[in-house]
Amino acid sequence: MGLKGEDYFAEHLNGTAPTESATYKKWFIDVDHLYACLFINGDHWVALDIDLPVRRINIYDSIPHLTTNPQISKQCMFLRLMIPAMMSAFVPINIRKKSNAMLDVKRITKKVPLNKDPGDCAIYTLKYIECLALRKSFDGLCDENIDAICVKLAAELFDEVRESAKPSNLDLCGVGFIE
């Protein structure tokens, strides 16, 4: 890997990238968990809680019957290999022993709300991550509340990007984004 690629990974691991949302928190030192959404099988979203100290990817799936454990494990393979390699390359040996051993994968099923009416797995995935990151329970996350959750999420997203989402700040001709 060339220097440019190494810099890219080091910046993410050290919390300095992407620059517009840099936290300056270092993986394994300041950050124990990484959260991500993973699109699997071309039609389904699951939430990932990547537990760095435990060396495991916890999978939160609102419709678990859509995939098998071997399918999930295969879909996560790039993360299972890449994250340990990144940490071995960039986390000092006095903080973390070098190891490129693959991360384990575990599907979490206890107390995980299920999406009985398919089509809302992306919203469930975002809410799983929000609850996990805030250390909150999944209380209230259910099909009966999903429409209200969607409206609330849309309003929160709009509030977050209100200024940058004004038509005067957007390039509506498809040429690119205005910086």
Image (spheres, grey):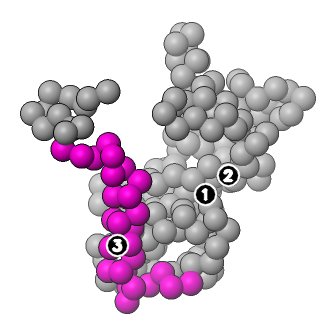
Residue 27 percent across, percent down from the top left: 70, 39
Residue at which label 3 appears: 150
Residue at which label 1 appears: 49
Contact (Cβ within 8 Å) of mark 2 with mark 1: yes
The question of residue 61 being in magenta is answered with no
> Which badge, 2 or 1, is on the more N-terminal residue?
2
Question: Which residue type does callout 2 highlight?
Answer: His
Question: Which residue type does callout 1 highlight?
Answer: Asp
Label 1 – label 3 distance at C-alpha: 22 Å
Per the rendering, the mark at residue 62 is none
The question of residue 158 being in magenta is answered with yes
Residue 30 seen in the current view:
yes
Residue occupying the far left of the picture = 173
Q: Which residue is drawn at the image coordinates 33% and 46% (left, top)?
A: 163
For numbered disc 1, what is the local secondary structure? strand
Most common SS among magenta residues: helix
> Which badge, 3 or 2, is on the more N-terminal residue?
2
Q: In front here: 15 or 55?
A: 15
Contact (Cβ within 8 Å) of mark 3 with mark 2: no
Contact (Cβ within 8 Å) of mark 1 with mark 3: no
Question: Which residue type does callout 3 highlight?
Answer: Cys
Residue at which label 2 appears: 33
Residue 128 left/right relative to 38: right
Quarter of the rendering containing residue 89: top right
Residue occupying the far top of the picture = 3
